[in-house]
Amino acid sequence: LIQTNQSLDKLYIQENPKLKYRVLNHWDNLNGTVERGYAGYSIWNWERLPSYKEQRYTDYARANASIGINGTVLNNVNAQAKSLRTDWLVKASGLADVFRPYGIKVYLTAKFSAPKEIGGLNTADPKDPQVRKWWKEKVKEIYSLIPDFGGFLVKANSEGQPGPQDYGCSHADGANMLAEALEPYGGIVFWRAFVYQNERHVDRVINGYNEFKPLDGKFAKNVFVQPKNGPIDFQPREPFHPLFGGMPDTPLSLEFQITQENLGHAGHLVYLGTLFEETLQSDTYENGKGSTVSKVLQNYGESHGISAIAGVPNIGTDLNWTGHLFGQANWYAFGRLAWNPDTSSGEIAEDWARMTFSNDKSVISPVLKIMMMSRETYVNYTMPLGLNHIMNYDTHNGPEPWHDDPVWTAFDYHKITRDSIGVNRTAKGTGATGQYHNPVREMFDDIRKCPQEYLLWFHRVPWNYKMASGRTLWDELIYHYYKGVDEVRQMQTIWNELDGKIDRERFNHVASLLKYQEQEAIWWRDGCLLFFQDYSRLPIPANLEQPKHSLKYYKTIPFPHDWKGRYE
């Protein structure tokens, strides 16, 4: 209140968090790198732990405590078993000692095959008594070193990670084995629902629901099933995951991504508060109108006694912690929404802007305008109208709708042909719409009712399909891609209004990154439209800024720099 110049008259505030567990899921590797991290290396200096405790650990704890975060998973979901060895547990205990005064518990990602890899057993079968005994002894050891240890996060049977299905067991069998070991100490298990085996004949959108829905009610009382916010993988826009509202007898923890894996990395200004709010305020209709994802999460507190939310952070060794100055707003927004999932993203943005820059309206107004338009701007110049997963296969940055190899192809995600584009996920297609409650199911299933922002997610649409705007689908795609680039240029103009009103270092930092963002937005726009045009055979209107390079150019180099025309 002081920082935002609000009145302290008759001050009386009493707040309780709406969700019990508010946890960061670090994707930090033990070698100091961060998977899908774009703000430098891991801030955990494992070599010097536990003896040397860097000041930054305390700063980190204070920052998180200030926004109500009360837990942190130290290591990557693609885990190494050695993180559970005694020597590494001692190191983790050093961080737990720093975090404890700030009310933050330490969690670890557990690799399911740890009993084989570091335990000397020849199996990790959750039904094996020796395996169960090993986990109980390991958990006992952990609590002897970290008395307030929070529990385990597990990624299993997805993207090559080991899991209970390797032994003919279910996700519930695997989670409950760990839950049994943790239960005497008050520990919990976060069991991720992000599971797919990249089977080309199976629509990835329906995988998670199909695997976990039949297991509803079969998990131990101290297990969370943890889906991502949407059913694919942290895309710029996804419909909410149908498991929210679909597993009433199992507490779910929602996983957001704060790091911008598929949102331009730390080079793009994209305020994610609006994305988080869009998901949280989506109505599942689980118990009729008003059963928003936010309410579903909060209701687990009453029905199961526990509730949770998780975020994959964008924190690293960069001087400003997050790579892009505005990336700090996403870390902040996650914490605020974890405390109260019904808070307005606009209110959060204003609080952050006032505390970060100034309470001067001539500063706040342009900053807020940029923040509140930025996510939709990114969607416009990358994957509008429900397009998804057409980013570069290796880097997840920049366009690659043309990627096609025997293992992975972007064509599964856009299904482009001479006459149409989009994936039929209706009742007559892959059936993804059937995983939602009515009236959401009917809305998504009917092309006339489906919200435009999810059109190509759920439907195959002809190029000449007439949109609500009166434009054809082809012209609507062009409109959005060009609008996105224009909006980045608007963001530059708005930011330039702040020249002289904030310090030179931060002004130049953001100004230079907005120029970079403009370049990448053009890369997305031109690369995608030229690729789509190969199929639609329709023109880009002559009055618009025409692509400077050929499609071959964009297909040949994985970043948007003109190498003096050598690839033309």
Image: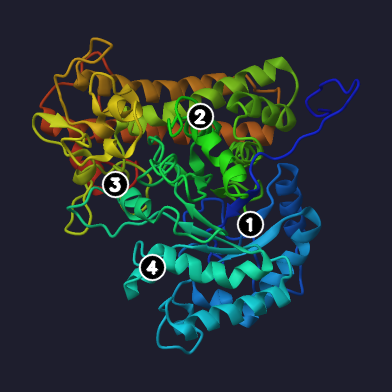
On residue 281, which mark appears? 2
The CA distance from mark 2 to mark 1 is: 25 Å
Q: Secondary structure at mark 3?
A: helix
Q: If you read the primary sequence from the N terminus, does the residue marked by circle 1 or circle 4 appear first?
A: 1
Residue identified by numbered label 4? 161
27 vs 470: above or below: below
Residue occupying image coordinates x 46% and y 44%: 248
Q: If you read the primary sequence from the N terminus, does the residue marked by circle 3 or circle 2 appear first?
A: 3
Q: Amino acid at mark 4?
A: Gln
Find out whether the residues at labels 3 and 2 contact each other: C-beta distance under 8 Å. no
Q: How is the image coloured?
A: rainbow
Find out whether the residues at labels 3 and 1 contact each other: C-beta distance under 8 Å. no
The CA distance from mark 3 to mark 1 is: 29 Å
Residue identified by numbered label 1? 72
The CA distance from mark 2 to mark 4 is: 32 Å
Residue occupying image coordinates x 28% and y 11%: 469
Q: Amino acid at mark 3?
A: Ile
On residue 206, which mark appears? 3
Q: If you read the primary sequence from the N terminus, does the residue marked by circle 2 or circle 4 appear first?
A: 4
Q: Amino acid at mark 2?
A: Gln
